[in-house]
Image (cartoon, rainbow, N blue to C red):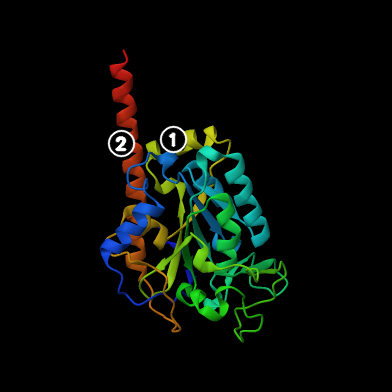
Amino acid sequence: MMKRTTILLALVLLAATASAEKTDVLLAKAWPGAPVAGLEAIGNGVGIVFSPDLSVPGNCRFYTALGFACFDSADWLQILSEVHAHNISKPARKIKTLILETHGTNGNGLKVQTGKKETDDRSYISIGALQEWLEPVGVKHIIVSACNSGRLLRPEIYLKLNRDPGDKLFLPATRGIIDATDSFDPKRNPITVITPGASHIETTLVGALRELAPSTREALERAAKTRDVKLPVQFAVSEMLIKMLLRDPQLELRTGAWVEELSKVQTSPQASERIFTAFVAHLNYVAAKDSRTQTASAAAAR
């Protein structure tokens, strides 16, 4: 078994009071096609934002092959511009749900960055600002997979971030900070903000294409070619994204709640490996099922 590379995000989440039924309802609205889609359509209607330092080279090309819209930048203004451009130019693949694989800066702001040096490219945005910017182009749901995501919804920073929170993770915003405008009213904004429902440290795993079945790799290659991208050697995937894709019964999601406390609970390496193995098995299953369907269709057409 290969040693799994992990990227850890200190993630304070909400008390585990969300019911499984509530999670199912949220996922049915935010990502309805996830369990049954073919490989090239798994991410239809879903966008993913990666902080560059939580990603791997070429990571977005892997997600593009799976049908996601993917964004990897340390500049929130560039990310927002690309989301707008995508939804305007590709109405058939319009992003309705945006998943944030970013930092939460101990709950002091959504951060994307290239690294931990003070001079590295880095920017921040508030939850309210995201809602304000994304509503005009049709985004309906924001799913936050980030450090201390529950604290990001605190009233005092929901609209405008504190520039001096006294946190060592709040490094210089070399690419700026985006707040909501004074006229923005979140109560009138239709975008649903979804966060995890249990306190833990979120883990992002790094896998290799060679771990997928040969037929799955071939299917991904075909999908990548159709979308004019080249598959990377590796890809990064968070445990939360895997659990959403698999409709894991242990996954709990919440909306409209915030917390103050930090959490140090995290998944064990053994449990992380099981989660990743389930992800690989799911991709292999979807690819095999799609292959059987195509074979049956071809035989029927003869």
Q: Nearer the viewer, residue 289 or 97?
A: 97
Q: Is residue 135 visible?
A: yes
Q: Position of residue 111 (x, y in %)?
A: 59, 69
Q: Are marks 1 and 2 in contact (CB under 8 Å)?
A: no
Question: Label 2 belongs to which residue?
Answer: 289
The residue depicted at 48 percent of the width and 70 percent of the height is: 8
Total tally of numbered discs in the picture: 2
Q: Position of residue 215 (x, y in %)?
A: 38, 36
The residue depicted at 43 percent of the width and 35 percent of the height is: 218
Residue type at mark 2? Lys
Where is 36 relative to 144, above or below? Answer: above
Q: Secondary structure at mark 2?
A: helix
Question: Which label lies toward us, 1 or 2?
Answer: 2
Q: Specify the label residue 229 is tagged with.
A: none
Task: State left or right for residue 48 relative to residue 79.
Answer: left
Residue type at mark 1? Glu
Location of the N terminus by quadrant is bottom left
The residue depicted at 61 percent of the width and 43 percent of the height is: 88
